Amino acid sequence: MQEFNYHSHTYRCGHADLDFTDEEYVEAYIKMGFKRMAFTDHCPEKNKIDKRNDMRMEYSQRKEYLESIQSLKEKYAGQIEIQSGYEVEYLPGEEENLKELKAETDKLILGQHFVYDDNKNLKIHGKDDFSDKELLRHAEYIEQAMKCGIPDIIAHPDIYMLKRKEFGESSISM
């Protein structure tokens, strides 16, 4: 059995269980036999890019989020290792903001949920259809994030297939 989970969202993102507290996550993981966990809520954005409701915590929630995790680390020391983190998306020009988020946490996971199209409009996986060019851009963004040293983990790298009707040459090259 896997004894860790590094992809845990909290009520702050608006789409996780809104009635589940941070401590209830910790207690549930301990009960399941987990040895390590990381809270990696969808990151707050200093420059609001993802304008969808119920997708990520507000920038103003950062301090409370990190303080909650630190408190739980101390309370449950010896029972489970708890790390703080964020799930982030890479976009060109946002490197410094992402590095700032990385500096204040233990772990960043990259869940590349969107890319820019040629007109700098956000294309969202699962909502928008992606051209072959945009699929390749998805891979380029992941590669660039890794070159910049941003993620510790890549989450759901196959998310680009959510709305894809065909699995073709550009999908294979991903």
Image (cartoon, helix red, strand yellow):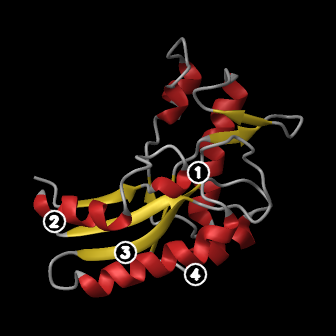
Q: Determine the secondary structure under disc 1.
A: helix
Say whether disc 4 or disc 1 marks the residue closer to the N-terminus: 4
Q: Amino acid at mark 1?
A: Ile
Which mark's residue is nearer the viewer, 4 or 2?
2
Q: Is residue 127 above or below residue 154?
A: above
Say whether disc 1 or disc 2 marks the residue closer to the N-terminus: 2
* Residue on which disc 3 sits: 83
Which mark's residue is nearer the viewer, 3 or 1?
3
Q: Amino acid at mark 2?
A: Ile
Side of 18 relative to 82 (left or right): right
What is the spatial separation of the Cα atoms under label 4 and label 3, in whole angstroms? Answer: 13 Å
Residue 91: percent from left, percent from top? 72, 53
Q: Which residue is at a point 73% across and 73% down the rendered structure image?
A: 96
What is the spatial separation of the Cα atoms under label 4 and label 2, in whole angstroms? Answer: 27 Å
The foreground one among 11 and 120 is: 11
The label number, if any, that marks residue 103 in the structure image: 4
Circle 2 Cα neighbour tier, 10 Å, few/some/many (<14 / 14–19 / ≥20): some
Q: Is residue 34 above or below residue 155?
A: below
What is the spatial separation of the Cα atoms under label 4 and label 1, in whole angstroms? Answer: 19 Å
The foreground one among 14 and 83 is: 14
What is the spatial separation of the Cα atoms under label 1 and label 2, in whole angstroms? Answer: 32 Å
Say whether disc 3 or disc 2 marks the residue closer to the N-terminus: 2
The foreground one among 77 and 92 is: 77
Which mark's residue is nearer the viewer, 4 or 1?
4
**Residue 28 lies in what quarter of the image?**
bottom left
